[in-house]
Image: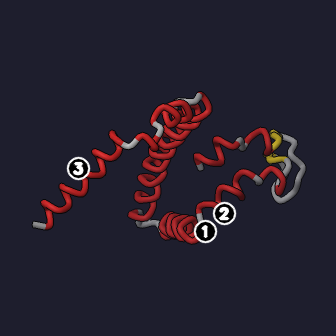
Amino acid sequence: MASAVVIFLLAQFLWSLVTVKNYQWDVFAQYFFNDAILRGLRLTLVLTVVSIIGGFLLGALLALMRLSSSAILNSAAFGYVWFFRSVPLLVQILVWYNLGYLYPTLGLGTPFTTNFWIYEVQTTSLILAFFAAAL
């Protein structure tokens, strides 16, 4: 009986979507198929695919590290998972995107100094918005 009620309510809802003029489907289509919306949808799908692939690869690497008999690899993987599960996602995105303001340049050189004599790069050009969101 409950299934029949649910099916009836669903059919009534779908019928109202088709017959009620106040939904203004032409206005919906005008805004939904706008170029800005479609570009945002495409960017969202690309970010989703990149994040899935990156997450799978990183997860496989961390799983191998956790299964390792090495205490250093096991602890490093545990610490990484613990830290990134503890920090909220929005905070991570903001930190990664604004990393360029915390560290204006990154590079290789003398350890524990800012003497980058081997290689130096501006952080704001290295970590773009797409890269921060993918991370």
Amino acid type assigned to the residue bearing label 1 in the image: Val
Q: Position of residue 130 (x, y in %)?
A: 64, 41
Q: Which residue is at a point 59% across and 50% down the rendered structure image?
A: 135
CA neighbours of label 2 inside 10 A, class few (<14), some (14 to 19), many (20+): few
Which circle's residue, 1 or 3, is located before the other in the chain? 3
According to the picture, the residue beneath numbered tag 1 turns out to be: 87
According to the picture, the residue beneath numbered tag 3 turns out to be: 11
Q: Which mark is residue 91?
A: 2
Q: Which residue is at a point 41% across and 52% down the rendered structure image?
A: 60
Tell me, yes or no, if residue 72 can be seen here: no
Amino acid type assigned to the residue bearing label 3 in the image: Ala
Helix, strand or loop status at disc 1: loop
Of the pair 110 and 32, the residue shown nearer to us: 32
Which dot, 2 or 3, sits closer to the camera? 3
Of the pair 47 and 54, the residue shown nearer to us: 47
Amino acid type assigned to the residue bearing label 2 in the image: Val
Q: Residue furthest right?
A: 115
Q: Is 32 placed left or right of 96 in the picture?
A: left
Q: Position of residue 46 (x, y in %)?
A: 52, 36
Do the CB atoms of the residues marked 1 and 2 lie less than 8 Å apart? yes
